[in-house]
Structures are given as C-alpha cells and as structure tokens.
Amino acid sequence: MSRVALFVTGGVAAYKACEVLRGLQRAGHEVRVAMTDDAQRFVGTTTFEALTHSPVLSSLYGLDGDPIPHISLSEWASLALVCPATGNVMAKMAAGIADDAVSTTLLACDCPTLVAPAMNVRMWLHPATQANVTTLAGRGVSFVMPDSGLLACGDAGQGKLADVGRIVEEACALLSGSPRPRDLAGRTLLVNAGPTHEAIDPVRFIANASTGKMGYAIAAEAIARGAVVRLVSGPVSLDAPTGAELVRVVSAADMLDACLAAFDGADAAVCTAAVADYTPRHASRHKLKKSVERLDAIELVETTDILATLSARKGDRVVVGFAAETDDVIPYARAKLARKGCDLIVANDVSRPDSTFGADTSRVAFVSAGGVEELGTLPLPQVAREVVDRVAMLLGGSS
C-alpha cells in the first residue's frame, strides 16, 4: 500500500479534496492530511480525520506528542499531493518558504510531488504564478493543470480545479512509477470530436448521440504527453482540455474545412467525431410551420467523408478512425479500415451500456492490417491512454 500526504490549501475547491481522498483510498492507497489555516475555513479537520482515521496536521506543535510532525509526515509519504494548490502555496514552494505546517512539510518532502492548482483566472495567468509553475516543473514537480470554466468568483476562464478522476489517475500513475511518458513532444495531432448538427431550418437539425467525451479524453492524454493538439469539436457541453487549440464547428461541412486546415502540418489525426453521413439538400432559412409547410420528407445528400479524405492525403502521416457499431463490430471495422485507407480503426459496440455514447467507460478493439486486439471495459481516460499509446507507436514507426 502506497502512502499519500494530501496537502489542502485555502480555496472554495477545498471540498473536492475529500473526493480526491476517497478516490485514492478506493485505489488502495493510505492517505494522511495536512491543512493550512485558510483551508480550515472551507472544510474542517474533523471531516478529514473521519475519512482517514488519522489526525490532521494543521500545526507544527503538539500533534499527539510528536515533537516534529512535519518531518514524520514527510518521511512517511510516498507521494505529496497538493490539492487544491493556491497561488500562495505554489509561490512558497518555488521560493522555499516554510512558515506553516503545510509549507514546512512540503519543504521536507523528498518524494514525488503532484500539484493541482485552483484559483481565479487572472491569478493563474499572472506572470508570477506562471513563473512559479515553470520553476517547480523544472525541479521535477508534476502538475494536473486547471480546467477552464465558470469559476466560483463568477469569472470564466482557466483556473478551475481539474476533474477529480484525472487528479486521482495522475497520483496513481506517479505512485506506480509509470507517469505519462513525453513521447509525443514535438508532435502535432489533430483530434476531432463530438457530433455534427445538420440544419433542417434555423431551429431543427439532424444529429446523433455523440457527447465528445472520448475525443476530449484523447486530446487531454495527448497534451499530457507533450503533443500540440488541434481539437476540432462539434457541439458538446464539455470544457476543452487545457492547452488544446480548440476550433468549434457545427455542421459536417464546417468540420471538414476545419480538419483539413488543422491537418496541414500535423503528424497524425485521430478521428473520433460522429460526423453525419447525410445532410438536408436544402435548409430552410426560416422556421417551418407545420400548419402551412408540412415536412413530409427531407431530401438528403451525402456529406464528404472526413476520415477517407484525410487518409487519402496523409502520405507518411498517421490517421486513426473510430467505428461505433451495434452488431458485427469487428467485421464492420475491418471493412472500414480497408475502405477508408487509415492506419488503425478503434471499434466499439455502442449497443452495450458500458460502451455506449455518453458512458464513462468503453470497451474497444484495435483493428489494423496486423490483426485485432480487444480490450476489456475500461474508464475513458484509460481507453484514451491506450489509443494514444498506439498513435505514439505508429508515429515512431513512421519516423
């Protein structure tokens, strides 16, 4: 059993540290907690003591008779996890300041350290904060970078604590000794994601059930491994992964144009988007009224096949496609591989509840000219890692 020292600092996101703690425990790790005085204004020590069955380190003095509790905790820990990390605590870490229980213990830690920042967007983007992040990363500190979204203060932008599951996953990877490799450093990837909406009139459209979760998870994984990611996204309700070059589109035609532009100069494309196969030949410019303009039939035309188009232009680049099927999954995926001309098809059975659109897990098979490799049901971040592993291998082979 690995041991995690969880350092909780002051901020509204402090309550999410409880969820992180439980996630680490479910993964089989023992957790002990240290808190700043400001953190205790958001969540009390009693909560963490009840969850860990251990006292919380909140003072340098008098912890159950231990005269040097900060040294004891630093020696005990296999991993130091700062969550949420304020701009203040990161500044202290960068400068080596030790003036409370948390900063003093962190200065004494010689184990791997993972930091999950959370703060106002202007504080996060301030040059001093960014310089501190750079300094700490240069010393080997790992980060789970904040997401973009609506912040507690009412502002919108980067600074939102990363997803709890992602923080737990990164911590577990560091504890296992297998953190993400930087095998895509210097590479540029196009990832498309989500559905497309094909307009019937200004308020009606043809669409499908894709949520974009898989594509966004792949984009986040590729970014974590050093890639520049150009994310072309259909209409979804997801925040883009931090660092992604996001282009939002609506229709299949829009997505084709954006993908062609993004593929220029890219090393690989991962096409997860559920692009409409058909679009109305003529979209009305006004809302159709059923009382006077009955919609008995919609004349459809085929859209341009984005996966096949990119595959025809790839040269020595890598193109990966997805096949969402409800029956005969592997035969259809093999046929799609041959028909589209891509390097790999990731096939999944969307009739399964553990692998359908919107699920947080998926069960995929990798279909290539070399054969078929089937995986069990896995969380989406792990599926994303498996997909990006194979993209990295294909790029290594092509280069």
Image (cartoon, helix red, strand yellow):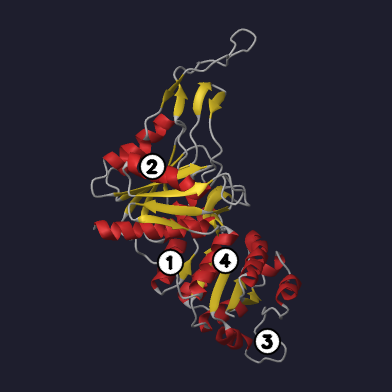
Circle 4 — which element?
helix
Name the N-terminal-most of marks 3 and 1: 3
Nearest to the observer: residue 355 or residue 63: 355
Gap between marks 1 and 2 measured at Cα: 33 Å
Q: Which residue is mark 3?
A: 61
Q: Is residue 395 above or below residue 278?
A: below
Residue drawn 67% across the image and 91% down it:
66
Circle 4: residue type: Val
Q: Nearer the viewer, mark 4 or mark 3?
A: 4
Q: Residue at x 69, y 78 (%)?
A: 56
Name the residue: 27% across, 49% down: 317
For the N terminus, the image quarter is bottom right
> Where does label 4 land, which residue?
168
Which element type, helix, strand or loop, lies under badge 1? Answer: loop
How many C-alpha atoms fall within 10 Å of the one at disc 1: few (<14), some, or many (≥20)? some
Residue at the spot of label 2: 335
Helix, strand or loop at label 3? It is loop
Amino acid of disc 1: Arg
What residue do we see at 24% from left, 50% from top? Answer: 316
Residues tagged 4 and 1 counted as in contact (Cβ below 8 A)? no
The residue under label 1 is: 180
Disc 3 to disc 1, C-alpha distance: 38 Å
Location of the C terminus by quadrant is bottom left
Q: What's the CA distance linking mark 2 and mark 3? A: 69 Å
Identify the amino acid type marked 3. Tyr
Give coordinates of residue 125: x percent, y percent: 47, 56
What amino acid type is highlighted by mark number 2? Ala
Q: Given contact means CB atoms under 8 Å apart, are the residues at marks 4 and 2 in contact?
A: no
Identify which residue, 324 or 128, lies in the foreground: 324
